[in-house]
Image (tube, helix red, strand yellow):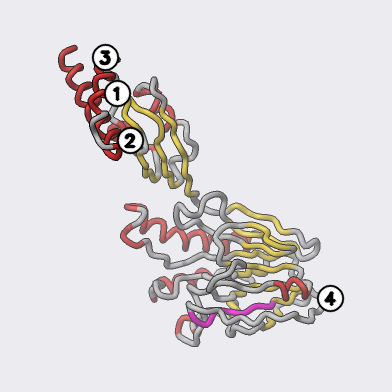
Amino acid sequence: MFINKFIHAADLHLGFKYKNKTLGSRSDERKNELFITFERLINYANENKIDLIIISGDFFERDALTYTETKHLMSIIDTYYGNIVLSCGNHDFYSDDYLFNNFTKNLHVFKTNSFERIDIADNVAIYGASWLNEHDNGFDTNKINLDKNKFNIASLHGDLSDGKYKIDIEPLLASGFDYIALGHIHKKGQVADKTFYAGSLEPLDFGELGEHGFYEVDTLSGDAKFVPFALREFIIKEIIIKEDDEFLDIITKFDELIDKDKNFYRIILKGSISADLNINKIINLVKDKFYYLETINNLSERVSVSNEIYQKILEKAKNYPDEIRQDAINIALKAMQSTERYYED
């Protein structure tokens, strides 16, 4: 068999549980979408005749994946005509138990923390190692004598920065691998020569912004193309409200946000709003236009009183300690505003 292309994916975290319903009513739906996207990935590989998928760790959540979910996962893998190679991470570390012993024949798993080689094609050799527990990878990466007649791939899970997840890829770079597939960091990108983090296939929370998907790698040219694939994005946006913005102006600022009916939005409200406008009522009016919306209210309330009253408040405030003076001024301004409005009516 000759492999022209392969997929590099990582950090699917199948079975991931949103503790305390982090995403509210969307938590269970989002958990299911992780499986849906894995199935979409298999369908993509089948339709595009891609013979190999490399998953660089954290394929699933070992401590959360249920028996039913495990059976569902295996049924998805069964639909793939090609081969999957897995180097386990700290969330799906390898051990000789039912979880791995019951996987399908076309899922090949590195079973030690020492570098092994898997040959599943005439032109491709895959090297890798797995975590054997969740605390320490114990990897011993040394320079490897590669068969230069093959396209040589290395797959590992870990962090290039110092810490308990650190991995050393310098020996791999010195070995001359054609592609180094990494997992653990949930942000895609090239980090060294021919070395890529695939990022998480689907973002899990607001710590994972931007595009998510996988790399499609051509074994003839060596080119790695990122394929955006996630069903949804997590997006953080600021909405700046100006002092002269009226009710409809603020509604329009929400309406102008794109793809709000399919993505997770966190809106940070900044600026100044008239005391006559209730921002919570505005949010309630627009929230049904969003698939998911949470807001952080950093607005200051605009207070309008006569200059004479304002100067009197400032004069009185001079008698207050520094640490509470501004709070006292704000309270007085709000109180005077409501009094003025009462008499104007």
Q: Secondary structure at mark 4?
A: loop
Q: Secondary structure at mark 1?
A: loop
Answer with left or right where residue 9 lies relative to residue 266. Answer: right
Quick one: label 2 or label 1, which is nearer the N terminus? 2
Name the front one of labels 2 and 1. 1
What label sits on residue 149 in the rendered view? 4
- Residue 272 drawn in magenta: no
What kind of element bears circle 3? helix
Question: Badge 1 is on which residue?
Answer: 303
Task: Pinpoint residue 152: horizontal percent, then vertical percent.
Answer: 75, 73
According to the picture, the residue beneath numbered tag 3 turns out to be 308
Q: Amino acid at mark 2?
A: Ile
* Camera-side mark, 2 or 3: 3
First in sequence: mark 2 or mark 3? Answer: 2
Residue drawn at point x = 55 percent, y = 79 percent:
137
Q: Vertical placement of 130 versus 308: above or below?
A: below
Dot in front, 1 or 3 = 3
Quarter of the image containing the N terminus?
Answer: bottom right
Specify start and end residues of the magenta stretch as a single range. Answer: 127-133
